[in-house]
Image (spheres, rainbow, N blue to C red):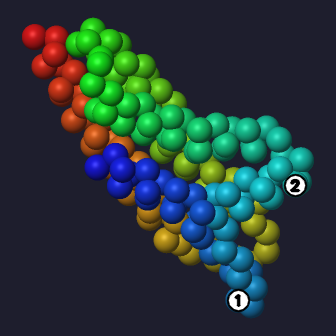
Amino acid sequence: MLLASLGCFFAGIFLPFTGVTKLWLFENQISVCQGLRVLWQNDELFLFLILLVFTICFPFVKVNALLALWIYPGLTPDQARNFYKFVSHLGKWSMLDVFVVAILVLTVKSTGVASIKIGNGFFLFFVSVMLTQFASMWTGRVAARLEK
């Protein structure tokens, strides 16, 4: 499940996230990575850093930390519980809330008559978020059993 989440995560950040059509003539497809590049080039460093950290870094670290919990065989039950607590705290700061902010930024930044279509990258990113959440819940249940 976590490997599928990681694959959807990478596909989601590189594939078109939204398509913006302005004046029914011009269409731009924007991925998360392209959006970050545009923010960097336009010196929007604050937004760039927020989106980079919360949309790319935190989810990537969370998925890899969960993978480490399942793959690394040498963890004691106490180490596994502590590691899971770290992952659960990390998860509170990532993905969905800032994801909404990213869509709002895109909507506010579009000017004139425009329509926004959701792209495949959006759906793949969403699947990645949901798979990671389910894997995290499942890992939490396993960690709770270790406490008994």
Q: Nearer the viewer, mark 1 or mark 2?
A: 2
For label 1, the residue is 24
From the top left corner, tell me how far across and down residue 107 is, in percent: 67, 61
Question: Which amino acid type is shown beneath numbered disc 2?
Answer: Gln
Relative placement, left or right, of 84 versus 104 is left
Identify which residue is drawn at 59% across, 44% down: 56
Q: Nearer the viewer, residue 46 or 4?
A: 4
Furthest residue toward left: 148
**Residue drawn 41% across the image and 26% down it:** 87
Q: Is residue 48 left or right of residue 134?
A: right
Residue 53 is situated, as x and y percent measured from the top left of the image, at 64, 37
Disc on the earlier residue, 1 or 2: 1
At 69% across and 53% down in the image, what residue appears? Answer: 105
Residue 117 lies, with reference to residue 138, above or below; the image says: below
- Checking the image for residue 41, the label placed there is 2
Circle 1 Cα neighbour tier, 10 Å, few/some/many (<14 / 14–19 / ≥20): few
What residue is rendered at 59% in x and 70% in y?
Answer: 16
Percent x, y for residue 72?
Answer: 33, 27
Is 74 located above or below residue 140 in the figure?
Answer: above
The image position of residue 18, as x and y in percent, is 60, 69
Q: Amino acid at mark 1?
A: Trp
* SS at circle 1: loop
Please state which of residues 86 and 29 is positioned toward the viewer in this rendering.
86
Quadrant occupied by the C terminus: top left
**Residue 6 appears in the figure:** yes
Q: What is the count of numbered marks?
A: 2
C-alpha gap between disc 1 and disc 2: 26 Å
Task: Name the quadrant containing residue 124.
Answer: bottom left
